[in-house]
Image (tube, rainbow, N blue to C red):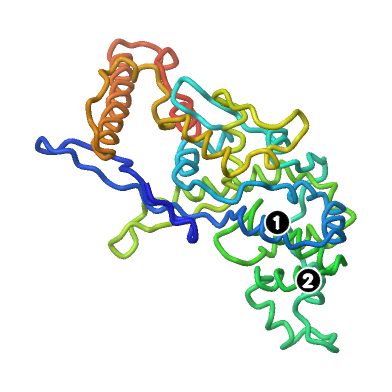
Amino acid sequence: MTICRGSRRAYSRPEEGGLLGGFVVVALRPVFRSRCSPLKLVKVNAALTEDQQDAVKTTGFGSMLNLKCTMLNCDFISRLVKHFNPDSKSLEFGRVRVYTITADDVRRALGLSCGSIPVPTDCQDHHFKHIWKMFGKEEGTEEVGKEEEPLKRGVTFSMMQQVFEEHKADVKFKTSYVLFVLSCFLCPTTKDVAAKKFYPTVHDLVQTPTYAWAEFVLDWLATEIAKYKKRSGKVVGGKKDVVGVAGCVLLLMLIYFDKHPMGMKVGSEGEPLIQSWTTKKIKERIAKEETLDLVDPIFEQFPAPSFRHPYTIAAFHDLKKNFVNQKQHLQLLDAALMGDVPETCTRDPSSASAKRNN
């Protein structure tokens, strides 16, 4: 596996495989892209003055200052995304393990507020003008007109970076920091600008810490992964469209590690996971797991493979997965032919959820 850290793309081992004429046919997993960038946030935090850090703590995002991870393992996270059910907001691994993710899990992982006030996202004219006065107008002008040009694309990362480098701890800085955290880490889209729906969240910085941020971040992630799964694999111009995953995909990994520690309990009770999981510890934890796909006890019934090359090993793993899937279909067919009640048949959580939704 090769990870292109700069572009957050991962080219990894075969994802799908099949047998054709006695030969193993494999297909590489599509490039995985994400705008979620813990590295950018860590770099910004490292350059903040003490006054700026104190200002950040008043916004309700003080826990972001303690982020330790600087890298996304795209291959590992892409597997978690594959196993994430956006409808139930759960990580589902066959019939064996199902981890439902709640707002409280997000709070524990990121240290965000579980407030009762929904995060406002309806950007009205006065919200835009508030941001325009900070970032869009030229010196000495008060009317909205051609001076809006700087905000044609929105508040970009480079614009926020300039504010950070001024080393001020004023309202503009706090506004920039909240927008930056949301746009590059907690609720990233596939663009390098702050979404306009974030403007209402910084209109009144006194209210900002009281919002239900944990629930908002989780809902955002579930929505974006659902969009990704619908778009992924579509053919555009004769080629498979490579789509990006928006949302805080790092969150999936932190929560998965917490719910399935494999002997690596990191951090103390009440301490956000992001300040305990360093890049080094994440690598150690991932190394403990051969593959996320091999979690069904039925795989233990297969003989141990003697393959040595990663591609042949991966193809053998895929062969086992295909066997399990086909066996489930045969179980359903057998039950139907025998007149059994469908509910008595064995299904994995994802299949059951999909059937309910249809």
Establish if 30 lies above or below 111: below
**Residue 315 appears at what percent x and percent y?**
26, 35
Mark 2 and mark 1: span between their CA atoms? 16 Å
Q: Tell me the quarter of the picture where residue 48 sits.
A: bottom right
What residue did someone put label 1 on? 181
Which residue is at the far left?
Answer: 21
- Left or right of 161 on screen, residue 21: left
What residue did someone put label 2 on? 131
**Residue 188 appears at what percent x and percent y?**
61, 56
Q: Identify residue type, mark 1.
A: Val
Establish if 225 lies above or below 204: above
Secondary structure at badge 2 equals helix
Identity of the residue drawn at 70% across and 56% down: 181
Count numbered badges in the picture.
Answer: 2
- Which mark sits nearer the N-terminus, 2 or 1? 2
Establish if 129 lies above or below 23: below
Secondary structure at badge 1 equals helix
Frontmost residue, 20 versus 340: 20
Q: Tell me the quarter of the picture where residue 52 sits.
A: bottom right
Frontmost residue, 95 versus 76: 76
Identity of the residue drawn at 80% across and 67% down: 127
**Residue 74 appears at what percent x and percent y?**
47, 48
